[in-house]
C-alpha cells in the first residue's frame, strides 16, 4: 500500500474583519500518526484567540510528552470546566487522530459532530459519549481509505443564519446535505472547506455572528523521499545501510561523493560525473543507475540550507541544489539515512573559512526546516 499521508486543509473567517479569530487550529505529526486540533475560544476577538491558542499549545505539548489523546482530553477538559466555573478564559475543542494505516479517532468537547467524506458522498458519523468529570466528550472511530477524510467545524458554521431567518441555525444535518449535494455535482473533496465557509457566510448575510472554521483532514497516497548521506561509522555496515536505503519506497537521493561510491559499489553500478552539468555556483552532480539524484555532500547541503527561504523563481536552473530542494519540498515524508563516519576533510581550515558547516551540523538544521514546513522526518543513523 505504501505510505498513507494525512493532509489537512483549513479555511477560516473571523467574526469581525481584521480582528483575531477565536478559532485556532494546530497539528502534531510523528512516525505513527497525525493529529489535528480545532479549538473554539469562548467569545470572540483577542480574548477568545488567546484561550484557544493556549489550549492548542497545551494539547500539543501533552501529546509530545507521551500522553494519549484520551488522557490529554481528560486533563484539558478538567481545566476548562474549572475555568468556566470561575468565569475565566476557556475554549471548546475537537481533535482527529489518524494512524498511518488510516484508522481514525475523533474526540469533541462541546463542538459539532464530524462528517465522514468519500469521493462522492458524505455522512454524519455516529459516536458515543463519555463523562470526563463535569464535561461530556463525544467519540467516533472509523477507518479511512485513500481519498476519504473527515470534516471538523466550529459552531459558527452549524449556527449560521441563527437570528437571520434560520431559527435553529444551519445545523449539522443540513451542512452534511450541502456537502453531499456538492460532491454529487462534481466538487472535489479538497474544495469543501471553502465551499462550506462561503455557504455559511451566505446564511449569515455576510455578517457572521461567530468565527467560522472548517478543517478537512483526509488521506492520500504519500510522497516519500529517501536521502542517504555519509558513510556508516563502521565499514562493515556499508552493505546493510545501503540495502535499507534502497528497500524503501520513494525517490532516492545520495549526497556525498564517498557515499555515492559506496552506493555504486553495493549496486555494482558505474559512478560518474553528470556530463550535462553546467551550474555556475553549485558543485557538480553525479549519476548512478537506479538513483534519482546524486550530489556532492557538505557544500551542496549548505547551499540548500542557505536558499531555503528564497523565492523559487530566483533559483538557478539545472542545478543539483535546485533539484534537491524541489524533491524535498515536494515530499510528505523524508527518510534520512545518516552515516556517522566523520570526514577528515571537513576539519580543513578552508571549510571553516568559507562558512561551510559539516554534515553532522548542517543536516540537523535542514531537518528542523523540513519539520517547520510540516514534513514527517525519519532519521536512521549508523
Image (cartoon, rainbow, N blue to C red):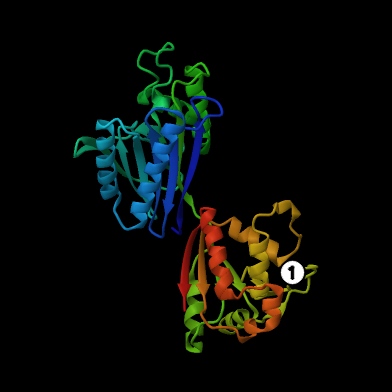
On screen, residue 105 above or below 320: above
Residue placed at 46% from the left, 26% from the top? 181
Q: Give residue 328's quadrant in the image.
A: bottom right
Residue 222 coordinates in the image, percent (x, y): 50, 55
On screen, residue 305 above or below 263: above
Q: Give residue 366's quadrant in the image.
A: bottom right
Residue 307 coordinates in the image, percent (x, y): 68, 60
Taking depth in this image into account, of 191 and 20 the one nearest to the observer is: 20
Residue 61 coordinates in the image, percent (x, y): 37, 52
Residue placed at 47% from the left, 23% from the top? 200
- Within 10 angstroms of label 1, few (less than 14), some, or many (20 or more) residues? many
- Secondary structure type for disc 1: loop
Q: Give residue 301's quadrant in the image.
A: bottom right
Q: Which residue is mark 1?
A: 282
Residue 365 coordinates in the image, percent (x, y): 56, 65
On screen, residue 65 above or below 129: below
Residue placed at 74% from the left, 69% from the top? 282
Work out whether residue 22 can be spotted. no
Where's the N terminus, which quadrant?
A: bottom left
Q: How many marks?
A: 1
Taking depth in this image into account, of 274 and 351 the one nearest to the observer is: 351
Taking depth in this image into account, of 32 and 266 the one nearest to the observer is: 32
On screen, residue 42 above or below 318: above
Residue placed at 48% from the left, 71% from the top? 247
Work out whether residue 379 can be spotted. yes
Amino acid at each position: 500500500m505504501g505510505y498513507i499521508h494525512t493532509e489537512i486543509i483549513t479555511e477560516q473567517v473571523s467574526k469581525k474583519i481584521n480582528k483575531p479569530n477565536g478559532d485556532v487550529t494546530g497539528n502534531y505529526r510523528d512516525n505513527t500518526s497525525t493529529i489535528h486540533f480545532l479549538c473554539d475560544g469562548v467569545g470572540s476577538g483577542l480574548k477568545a484567540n488567546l484561550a484557544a491558542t493556549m489550549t492548542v499549545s497545551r494539547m500539543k505539548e501533552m501529546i509530545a510528552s507521551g500522553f494519549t489523546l484520551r488522557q490529554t482530553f481528560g486533563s484539558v477538559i478538567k481545566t476548562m470546566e474549572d475555568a468556566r466555573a470561575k468565569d475565566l478564559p476557556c475554549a471548546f475543542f475537537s481533535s482527529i487522530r489518524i494512524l498511518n494505516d488510516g484508522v481514525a479517532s475523533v474526540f469533541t468537547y462541546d463542538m459539532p459532530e464530524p462528517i465522514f467524506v468519500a469521493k462522492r458522498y458524505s455522512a454524519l458519523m455516529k459516536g458515543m459519549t463519555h463523562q470526563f468529570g463535569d464535561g461530556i466528550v463525544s467519540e467516533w472511530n472509523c477507518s479511512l481509505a485513500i481519498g476519504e477524510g473527515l470534516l471538523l467545524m466550529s459552531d459558527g458554521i452549524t449556527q449560521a443564519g441563527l437570528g437571520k431567518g434560520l431559527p435553529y441555525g444551519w445545523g449539522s444535518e443540513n451542512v452534511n446535505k450541502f456537502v453531499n449535494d456538492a460532491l454529487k455535482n462534481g466538487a472535489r473533496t479538497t474544495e469543501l472547506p471553502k465551499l462550506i465557509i462561503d455557504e455559511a457566510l451566505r446564511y449569515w448575510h455576510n455578517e457572521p455572528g461567530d468565527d467560522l472554521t472548517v478543517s478537512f483532514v483526509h488521506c492520500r497516497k504519500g510522497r516519500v523521499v529517501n536521502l542517504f548521506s555519509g558513510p556508516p561509522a563502521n565499514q562493515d555496515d556499508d552493505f546493510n545501510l545501503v540495502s535499507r536505503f534502497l528497500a524503501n519506497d520513494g525517490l532516492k537521493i545520495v549526497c556525498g561523493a564517498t557515499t555515492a561510491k559506496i552506493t555504486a559499489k553495493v549496486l555494482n553500478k558505474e559512478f560518474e560525473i553528470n556530463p550535462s552539468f553546467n551550474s555556475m555556483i553549485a558543485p557538480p552532480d553525479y549519476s548512478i543507475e537506479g538513483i534519482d539524484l546524486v550530489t556532492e555532500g557538505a557544500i551542496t547541503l549548505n547551499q540548500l540550507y542557505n536558499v531555503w527561504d528564497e523565492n523559487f523563481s530566483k533559483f538557478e536552473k539545472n542545478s543539483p541544489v535546485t533539484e534537491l530542494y524541489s524533491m524535498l519540498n515536494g515530499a510528505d515524508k523524508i527518510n534520512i539515512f545518516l552515516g556517522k563516519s566523520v570526514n577528515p576533510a571537513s576539519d580543513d581550515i578552508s571549510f571553516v573559512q568559507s562558512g561551510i558547516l559539516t554534515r553532522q551540523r548542517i543536516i540537523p538544521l535542514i531537518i528542523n526546516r523540513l519539520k517547520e514546513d510540516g514534513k514527517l522526518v525519519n532519521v536512521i543513523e549508523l
